[in-house]
Image (spheres, coloured by chain):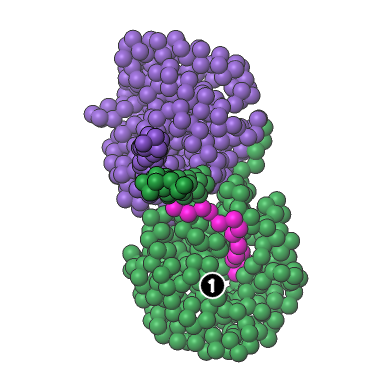
Chain colours: A green, B purple
Amino acid sequence: LRPPLIRRWFSSFLNWKISLMQHHCRLSQRIFTASVSLSTTKPLPERVKIVEVGPRDGLQNEKTIVPAEVKIRLIDMLSEAGLPVIEATSFVSPKWVPQMADQEEVMRGIQRKPGVNYPVLTPNLKGYRAAVTAGAKEVAIFGAASELFSKKNINCSVEESLQRFEEVMKAAKQEGIPVRGYISCVLGCPYEGKVSPVKVAEVAKRLYSMGCYEISLGDTIGVGTPGGMAEMLEAVKKEVPIHALAVHCHDTYGQALANILVALQNGVSVVDSSVAGLGGCPYAQGASGNVATEDVIYMLNGLGIHTGVDLPKLMDAGSYICRSLNRRTSSKVAQATCKL
Amino acid sequence: MVETIPFTLCFLWSRSYLGAFSLDGVSKRFICPLPERVKIVEVGPRDGLQNEKTIVPAEVKIRLIDMLSEAGLPVIEATSFVSPKWVPQMADQEEVMRGIQRKPGVNYPVLTPNLKGYRAAVTAGAKEVAIFGAASELFSKKNINCSVEESLQRFEEVMKAAKQEGIPVRGYISCVLGCPYEGKVSPVKVAEVAKRLYSMGCYEISLGDTIGVGTPGGMAEMLEAVKKEVPIHALAVHCHDTYGQALANILVALQNGVSVVDSSVAGLGGCPYAQGASGNVATEDVIYMLNGLGIHTGVDLPKLMDAGSYICRSLNRRTSSKVAQATCKL
């Protein structure tokens, strides 16, 4: 005999309630897991790609000119340390950036480790041609999120600068050369002050739709703080997928690691940094610039995030270049030599 | 019907269950908004200067503390009543206590390692004291030649006297994220010591990453354990910047509900375990971050930076604060 209707109804209602509770259990378990990672909305990435900018962005901003063989040795040591991307040099005119005058010699001299990329900066088509001739397999272009900064730096508006890069993009597309895009002043400008996240998103969208495979968002003067970083990423994520975003934080105000952490919490998994924190801030005399790769790796190691970087070997590279530059490292990890 | 009873119980249980795990409940429990206000405990005049090689005269210390009061800091650790034999920098403890201009509403706690120090502190006018323990047995043995439990028993006398006299006591725990001797430190051990100090009567427990080795994951894990034993409002973080991790660690602490942060003007105080390395996190850098986050501290950053410049000139040393180093010239 079939049970009475009401009994069947109660049973199915009970089953529905139980499955609802089980669903919430699973939901809370996922949230428990996420909450253990950092009590925030998202778990941290398992892997982070480090883009080492010391040999280009770092050295470019150092007063002491180092010979090509030192640059080559540095890049080779960084390759040995396991860095997956090492920005090797810049094909700007030596008139503007004397440190990069040996660009071709450096490109020809480095030992390219299989699986490692060695992008170079190319400010225009002429630089692009020279870069490819010298053996570059990846290039980088740059824009700014601030009109005033663009005008002061390269004497044209942001839009005009991007149009100049169209030629580079076209050639690179034809020749199958990947292009990385940089945006300056994403969290503040030395001339304009506050920079709108919407403007950053616009420029990021332009670069991405032009064909850049990755957009590096640069806090050029290091004024950004975690809230501003989160807000800016929120806007940019609407226009560019998160896997194509990188953060390039300067440590001028000591905020870099906190800003990087927040970027990771917001889904970013590519971080630019400079061995030994090479490269001061041209806008703040005596202040630091790029965040030190050693300090970033230390934090990521502590968080259990895989980078593929060997910290002791990285620190060797840092010591080497600091000796060559006759300067103290800006990396706190490198400075901390525990003597008990 | 007989099914209605289990059904009703299930229904009631599931409602309470769902209440705890509804998305709203989850968002409040697990996605912590940052605190609106953070109390900064300025440890430069004590913890900072104590670890500086250059001895500065009492009038310099007094001037520094007065400048810090003017900068709006709500708590300024003024000095330490340890024996001058051990810490020569703090030999002028009484003169400093008598010389400072106490700003209304500002606290000036002092460190008291034992009952003798406590008595001297109260006689000199202290209205709040601090005691300390370690989360590492080896550290305790090496530093003060006794176990953690023995050190806490010594402080029982201080607690008893302080309770009788209505003097609030703050507790410090060293090595919460790593020990120079033991290496890794268990969060459970930190929680035990925190619980001891809190139940002894400390109104606040400052969790110190003494050698600055901690990273954000470790900070979150440690706080998770301690929060089970001590309410979050009674916890503070005391991060060292020896490995550059301090601000990231502080940020994670804020994300986990902490709203009291210790720091040292100009990042005074190197690390005695890492020659040439930095120690305390710089108050200026912390304030810069909190200002950017829209968190209220009551601190006037320019005046704070003046205090930092002043003490660095007196010590003839460069500031460790990056904010202070960054003087934008356009």
**Residue under the image location 45 percent in, 32 percent down:** B227
Q: Where's residue B10, x and y in %?
A: 40, 38
Q: Is residue A152 visible?
A: no
Q: Residue at x 51, y 28 (%)?
A: B191
Q: Residue at x 48, y 36 (%)?
A: B223
Mark 1 lies on residue: A214
Residue A313 location in percent, x, y?
A: 71, 54
Label 1 neighbourhood size at 10 Å, few (<14), some (14-19), many (20+)?
many
Q: A234 above or below A143?
A: above
* Of residues B197 and B276, the one drawn nearer to the viewer in this rendering: B197
Relative height, residue B151 to residue B252 (above, below): above
Q: Point out residue A34 in the picture as x, y percentages from the top left corner.
A: 50, 49
> Above or below — where is B275 with respect to B294?
above
**Quarter occupied by the C terminus of chain B:** bottom left
Q: Chain of mark 1?
A: A
Q: Position of residue B320 (x, y in %)?
A: 48, 45
* Residue positioned 53% across, 67% down in the render: A243
Q: Amino acid at mark 1?
A: Glu
Whether residue B137 is visible here, answered yes or no, is: yes
The answer to if B73 sits in the magenta stretch is no
| Element under disc 1 | strand
Is A41 contained in the magenta span?
Answer: yes
